[in-house]
Amino acid sequence: MSKDKSKNRKKRSPFWKIMLFVLILAVIIHTVLITVLSITIQTFPVIRMIYEMINKALVVFYTVLLVGGGTITGILSGIKKLKQPQ
């Protein structure tokens, strides 16, 4: 029984590594974007609307990524448990 559990963990780990990598990458891009846009907002006030829209979109993206990732892994692990003979 213990061997099966370790195999399942090994199968699930790459998905979480990819999710974590995407999240870290998105945070880095978001930070760079905010610094660049905050500098340009001072010169062009029109860009503020675009900046706010991008900011809201990225917040939604993070939420979907975290909630969706957790839900997908939960469903996949549930299906695997159902398929295994008891």
Image: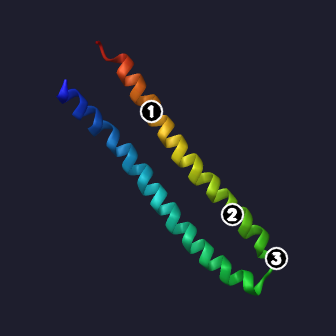
47 sits to left or right of 39: right
Residue drawn at x 54%, y 43% as measured from the top left: 67
Relative to residue 76, is residue 46 depicted above or below? below
x and y, in percent, of residue 33 in the image: 60, 72
Report, in whole angstroms, how far the alpha carbon at label 3 lies from the one at label 1: 43 Å
Residue drawn at x 70%, y 82% as measured from the top left: 40
**Amino acid found under the numbered disc labelled 3:** Val
x and y, in percent, of residue 30 in the image: 57, 67
Disc 3 or 1, which lies upstream in sequence? 3
User: Pointer 1: what residue?
Assistant: 74
Report, in whole angstroms, how far the alpha carbon at label 2 lies from the one at label 3: 14 Å
Residue drawn at x 46%, y 29% as measured from the top left: 75
13 sits to left or right of 22: left
Q: Residue furthest right?
A: 46
Report, in whole angstroms, how far the alpha carbon at label 1 lies from the one at label 2: 30 Å
Relative to residue 70, is residue 20 depicted above or below? below
User: Pointer 3: what residue?
Assistant: 46
41 sits to left or right of 10: right
**Amino acid found under the numbered disc labelled 1:** Gly
**Which of the 4 image quadrants contains residue 56?**
bottom right
Disc 2 or 3, which lies upstream in sequence? 3
Disc 1 or 2, which lies upstream in sequence? 2
User: Where is the C terminus found, in terms of image quarters?
Assistant: top left
**Amino acid found under the numbered disc labelled 2:** Ile
User: Pointer 2: what residue?
Assistant: 54
**Which of the 4 image quadrants contains residue 76?**
top left
x and y, in percent, of residue 48 in the image: 77, 73
Q: Residue furthest bottom?
A: 43
Residue drawn at x 47%, y 62% as measured from the top left: 25
